[in-house]
Amino acid sequence: MAVDASTYILGISAYFHDSAAALVKDGKVIVAIQEERLSRKKQDRGLPVQAARFCLEQAGISIKEVQHVAYYEKPFQKFERLLETQIAYYPQSFLPFRKTVKSWLREKLWVPHNIRKELGFKGDFFYAEHHESHAAAACYASPFEEAAYLTLDGVGEWACASLGTFTNNEIRQLAQQNYPHSVGMLYSAFTQYCGFRVNSGEYKLMGLAPYGTPKYVDLIKENFVSIQDDGSIELNLKYFKFHRGMRMINSKFEAVMGKPALKPEKHISTFYKDMAASIQAVLEEIVLKSAQHVKDKTGQKYLCFGGGVALNCKANQRLLESGIFEDVFIYSASGDAGGAVGAALLCANQEHPRRVAEVPSYLGRAFDSNSIQKTLEAHQVHFVQMEDEDLFLETSELLNEGKVVAWFQGRDEMGPRALGNRSILANPKGEEMRDKINEMIKFREQFRPFAPVVMEEHASNYFENIRNAHEMLFTFTTKESKQIEACVHKDGSARVQTVNTHQNKRLHQLLTKFHEKSGVPVLINTSFNRRGEPMVHSPEDALRTFFGSGLDVLVIGNFIIRKEENTNVKIKDIRLELD
């Protein structure tokens, strides 16, 4: 397939979870967004028609100017795996297969047809393998000229894990582990067992783990998973049901545990906390052994880590601190949403290899002052507009007083982390702030931690051995935990984001003013959304979330809106779907 040096390439991930679209021009990512931000359906799995159109609109082009659509996996290979698996476990697999096959026959096998129909695309299609897309997103976005790569997730077509090299702009796979022996599936099984939803609750399981003791590691390894020295695993499939049913685990799994799976929203006892700690320890062992094997096999100094498992910040800390590699890079959208970016970059580099200088974290839309003001006036919202210097000063004073501030600036972040453009910010002093945000704003579980955002030049004063923290993908052990109690987790760690003027100038300026006021260059930073909703995208979303929660202040662009000055404002609410 010939790819011209100046083509537009539209990357798409769809039909499983976290659908997204990305647009690449001249080998560089210029815009990308997840479908959920526009549809307002959390983890929207549908064809990302709105996201694709958004990308085109932001670039100022029509679909006629797109030469290639790059899809993040190969549907027929995936369907082949589904068929072989269902045949292997017939007749138990018949009923779930009957449910699953409908979506395949209706949409998943018709990717080109559906894209042509919905978008009017007439160009060529490029298909990457699922793990190839993960690897490409990690490698091309990395600062490394050459590196090894490791990808770990639930499953793609057949692969659940892969490893290889990135040299001369070429991604070369050396080995893979196939379904059903998947570390991602193993972790998701325990996610379900501990009462959380698969494909969305894994980060909750990670957050719960520090509240427990890993006393069941041996039980897990003796019954459910065999771990080899190279990090490959073998699941004891008699305890699992994901390969032949609609649940992850079966009654035999629960019998070994001695307790049934916890029902969602129920009290989490010490037993389930200990189980979360235990599977987290097992996951970390698998990640470290896999990384050591990659190092031994490739001899590379650096590692690019991708796939959904690469969103596990505690495992990433262990990996970084292990010293197996001199440095580790993880792309901000390392899960399936980032597959749209990876597939597009892989397509762009097929015949015109180039080093991608940078894949920005902020790839959505920036709303100008006129559009923001029109939205505020349409809803009769009382606001004050300020110049930058006054805005940062006023906001820092409000934060220092203990106000919780919704901070809406610039372009949306790409990926699951709020990186300071669609964030809720608060003073990190005192545990009561964490409880306030959980109870009145996020409406979520008390065990869930909040992340700190810190000025990069002061980060080493608060966190040990800190580096690679711009994307909030690693945890670090805290030094001055008493000053930032609200964003220190049970185990003394924090999922840190460092900020400099190059990465996010406005957030850095706000932190500078807050530092002058409070003596602390750190703020709580959590995503601007309520439980069950995606992060806000538009000013309309921001107002709906602001007036539908206990937030005190909304700073949107250069406008400040105070809740107490807008008691009569009514913004039509949307139904919360608890996750």
Image: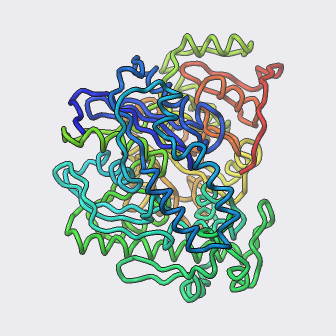
**Residue lying furthest left in this view?**
168
- Image coordinates of residue 232 in percent, x first then y, are 40, 76
- Image coordinates of residue 432 in percent, x first then y, are 71, 51
284, above or below 78, in the image: below
403 or 211: which is nearer to us? 211
- Residue at point 76% right, 48% down? 439
Would residue 188 be found to the left or right of residue 513 on screen?
A: right
Residue 163 appears in the rendering: yes
Residue 478 appears in the rendering: no
368, above or below 193, in the image: above
- Residue at point 35% right, 63% down? 150
541, above or below 522, in the image: above
Would residue 203 be found to the left or right of residue 8 on screen?
A: right
- Image coordinates of residue 535 in percent, x first then y, are 60, 38
490 or 126: which is nearer to us? 126
Q: Quadrant of residue 286?
A: bottom left
